[in-house]
Image (cartoon, rainbow, N blue to C red):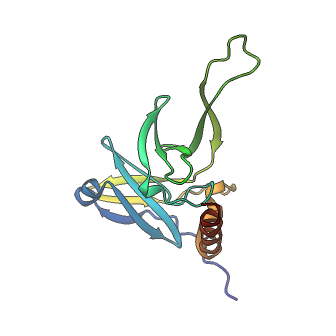
Amino acid sequence: MAEKEPSTGGPHFVGKKDELIEAKRSFRTLEGRDILIIYHQGGFYAMDSYCYHAGGMLQNGDIEEIDGKLCIICPKHKYKISLAKGECLYKGTNPTEKLPVPRWYSKGVKQRTHTVTETNGEVYVKLSEDTSWIESDYYQGEKGKVERAKAEAAEKKKS
């Protein structure tokens, strides 16, 4: 079996700026990785396209500002993921406070994000070079297809 080719890292051409702005969300596969490119409020963002939690399709999620951060909301289980860093946010209370007030907390980076650049009306994505495991890695590639199908089947059994 041949070894996997090392990532060229890019930057990969993903489309013309005007087309990507009009589309608002675009799906691309770069070096075997499924990426969602989002245009929102004047900026481009790129992240793994399947939610780290259960492989939900993030391209169908709403975008909201939460605690000053633009977040995509996974349509499957309503997980809130920041567009800029891939950080998962949740609302909770601190039971050690005298009067616990619900506020936003971070679960840390769960969704891999990628760098988007624009040159002369052309948009490029450079894949993340972070070598540490990020939970959204689980649903990528051939193994990821199998795991997404399993998660989908388990979801159907529940309903």
Q: Is residue 46 left or right of residue 1?
A: left
The x and y percentages for residue 131 are 66, 57
Looking at this view, is 129 or 18 the one in front? Answer: 18
Q: Is residue 154 above or below residue 136?
A: below
Q: Answer left or right for 34 relative to 21.
A: right
Viewport quadrant of the C terminus: bottom right
Image quarter of residue 24 = bottom left
Q: Residue at x 67, y 86 (%)?
A: 2
Residue 147 x, y percent position in the rendering: 65, 69
Q: Nearer the viewer, residue 70 or 43?
A: 70
Which quadrant, please, contains the N terminus? bottom right
x and y percentages locating residue 114 in the rendered image: 50, 54
Kindly identify the residue that appears in the image at 51 percent across and 50 percent down: 74
Residue reaching furthest to the front:
159
Does any portion of residue 30 appear in the rendered image? yes
Quadrant of res 124:
bottom left
Image quadrant in which you'd find residue 18? bottom left
Relative height, residue 44 to residue 31 (above, below)? above
Q: Residue furthest top?
A: 98
Report the side of 84 relative to 94 (left or right): left
30 vs 124: above or below: below
Q: Residue 40 in the image: x percent, y percent?
A: 34, 45
Q: Residue at x 38, y 52 (%)?
A: 38
Left or right of residue 29: residue 121: left
